[in-house]
Image (tube, grey):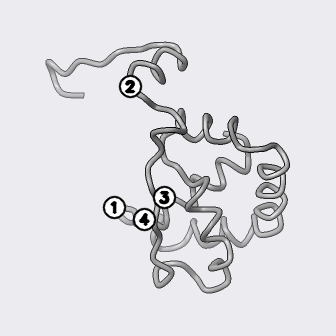
Amino acid sequence: MEDGEKFEILPAGEMRAKYGLTADNRPTITLNPARIPPEFHHLIPLAEQFGISDDLIREDVLRKTPKEEVEAMRRTIAAHHRALLDWLAGPESYSPKFSAEYIAFSCLLMAADGF
């Protein structure tokens, strides 16, 4: 952090309310299949729905999504967990700038893991 930069520490609920970090204000995620290995193309809708990089928004989306839908996502991701980790630990993990696809799938794993 640079000298003179300000930051604040607030409880998650206060931060969410103050900055609108809610499911209602979630970003729209549109991924490019050409940047995703073909074996994961069927997971793109899940990454676009749950692969939100902001922890507070992702948590709110998970809390407001029907439990059955969240559990179905978690089961689906569990079936591909090792392969997804292998992809995400590959060459792009050394890049100075991650692609939107890399970020969304990383955050999808966090959503599936309950983070």
Precedes in sequence: disc 2 or disc 1: 2
Q: Read off the residue under disc 2.
A: 19
Is the C-beta separation of discs 4 and 2 under 8 Å?
Answer: no
Q: Nearer the viewer, mark 3 or mark 2?
A: 2
Q: Read off the residue under disc 1.
A: 97
Position above or below: 81 against 50: below
Percent across and percent down for residue 99 are 40, 66
Percent across and percent down for residue 3 are 15, 21
Precedes in sequence: disc 3 or disc 2: 2
Question: Which residue is rendered at x = 49% and y = 65% of the image?
Answer: 102
Precedes in sequence: disc 4 or disc 2: 2
Is the C-beta separation of discs 4 and 1 under 8 Å?
Answer: no
Position above or below: 6 against 89: above
Rounded to the nearest angstrom, the CA distance separating label 4 from label 2 is 32 Å
* Left or right: 115 in relation to 77: left
Question: Which residue is rendered at x = 47% and y = 85% of the image?
Answer: 34
Q: Nearer the viewer, mark 3 or mark 1?
A: 3
* Left or right: 74 in relation to 93: right
Position above or below: 105 against 63: below
Position above or below: 32 against 3: below
Precedes in sequence: disc 3 or disc 1: 1
Q: Read off the residue under disc 4.
A: 94
Q: Read off the residue under disc 3.
A: 103
Rounded to the nearest angstrom, the CA distance separating label 3 from label 2 is 22 Å
